[in-house]
Image (tube, rainbow, N blue to C red):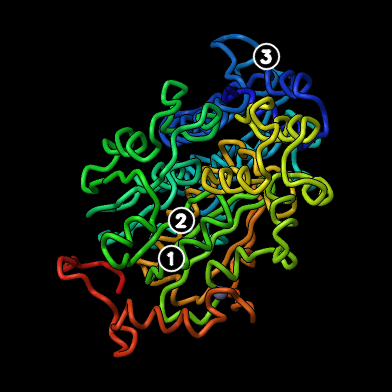
Amino acid sequence: MITPAQENQRMLARILGIDEDRAALQLAQTFAITAGQDEPTHFANELQAQLERTVRAAPADASSDIEIVIHAPPIRTAKKRLFVEISSDRVVISSSPLENAAAAPLHGIQRMIAACYCAGVVLAALIDGIDKEAVTDPFTVRFDALGATKDVLATPIALEDTVLVGAGAVGNGFLRAARHLDIFGELVVADPKVVGSGNPNRCLYFTPDDEKEPKAPTLTMRAQSDFPRLKLLPHVGTLHDIVEQQGRIRRVIVGADSRLARRSVQNDLPFEVLDASTTGTAEIIVHSHREPNRGACLSCIYPHIPDELSRAREIAAGLGLELSDVTESERIDARIAKVLAAKHSGLDEAALVGVAFDSLFKQLCAEQTLLSATGEQTLAPFAFVSNLAGAMLALELARLKSGARIADGKNYMFLSPWSPPHSFTRRMRPPIHDCEFCGRDTSHDALAIVWPELKTGTLPRIASNKQQGDGR
Ligand SMILES: [Zn+2]
């Protein structure tokens, strides 16, 4: 079984093209944070949480490879230093000392977003080549560029008839961020899977002791105390199971970990969708829509790859094999078993020999541990990447509830965790013309049956939903 540290090593080895032993040495580097009182201390605690599952916290009073200094004089012996300045509308991170005016208090989600970016800057300073872009110095996180302004984040959020799909890394990050919102009501957390041994490298509510425990109840049990007015209800199963029982679900918040799972959510005909995903450590996508939707749907954003109508290509890409490997034989031989065991954590090489490619593909589909469409392993990102995606998902919920999302019409955001956010990271993304969901009349017919309110132009309201401030 793979440990959280090994999961990080594997990720880094792949990014840098080095072996896992060398990656382990890079990740054995230490950090220390020196912070002033009040907001700098709160910021330091969030940064510590985001960093300590990837690199090591230096013991008190010991020297460190990097010292992060937040509105305080440096006190450590350190090879490198980063300075953080916190203002009401931005956080600046630089290798040069900053002005150090008094720090302004941040909203908890602003703090989490900036701390995640800061963790990326720290890793880029420690590990050559880890970031995909040139390092920006100073690195400025402007909250208005993301729409993460305090008025939006202060919106009261009543939840009911809402399912968080996926209790993995993005789901953990979503709740870690959402606890800072004025949020109340009920939220179902659905995930059919158990905690994998590597998961705690990025799931901040999980510990290594949670291995093999079902994700949904583990997450709701740990997170509940952060939500005095929101009841978290675990469901060990998929959204589809819930829809089969209840008929329809109004709002889904999607942190599932595969493209397939996201398309499947769309087919369950939710009225409103909020979604965030990560691709390795390189990118974060955030998307939302509400019916009647004239923009992209989940299937537009996460389409099948063009030639995957060929089953063999789909299987080869999902398993990370050459097309010829899959077409030459129906079953896995010893050579392919070795390749597969090296690429997928948790597969037993000996047991694979003789298994049909199709069976393995279906099994990994069910477990949602396939490789990505491009054949890259959908390896776990570092904690700060998943948590940044989770925080953006909580922000998107606040944007929808405050009306800001509908007012600006921007349904899509693509950002790199390694570059400062710009105002143009958000945009309106139209549907693709041959979408397997919204490109078909049958999908719209099905939506009209499940949501008859669409025909009359009235928005669906659940009888129990009488709360003010619901954003409708
Ligand atoms: Zn579509």
Rendered location of residue 443, percent (x, y): 47, 79
**Residue sitting at 57 percent across and 61 percent down?**
145
SS at mark 2 in the image? strand
Rendered location of residue 63, percent (x, y): 65, 12
Q: Which residue is mark 3?
A: 77
**Callout 3: 10 Å neighbours few (<14), some, many (20+)?**
some
Q: Is residue 463 left or right of residue 104?
A: left
**Residue 105: in sight, yes or no?**
no
Quarter-wise, where is residue 472 in the image? Answer: bottom left
User: Which label number is shown at residue 209?
Assistant: none
Quarter of the image that includes the N terminus: top right
Between disc 2 and disc 3, whose residue precedes?
3
The amino acid at mark 1 is Val
Q: Is residue 316 left or right of residue 293?
A: right
Q: Is residue 336 left or right of residue 304?
A: right
Rendered location of residue 229, percent (x, y): 21, 47
Quarter-wise, where is residue 382 in the image? Answer: top right
The amino acid at mark 3 is Thr
Rendered location of residue 65, percent (x, y): 70, 19
User: Which label number is shown at residue 254?
Assistant: 2
Q: CA distance from mark 3 to mark 1?
A: 49 Å
Q: Which residue is mark 1?
A: 273
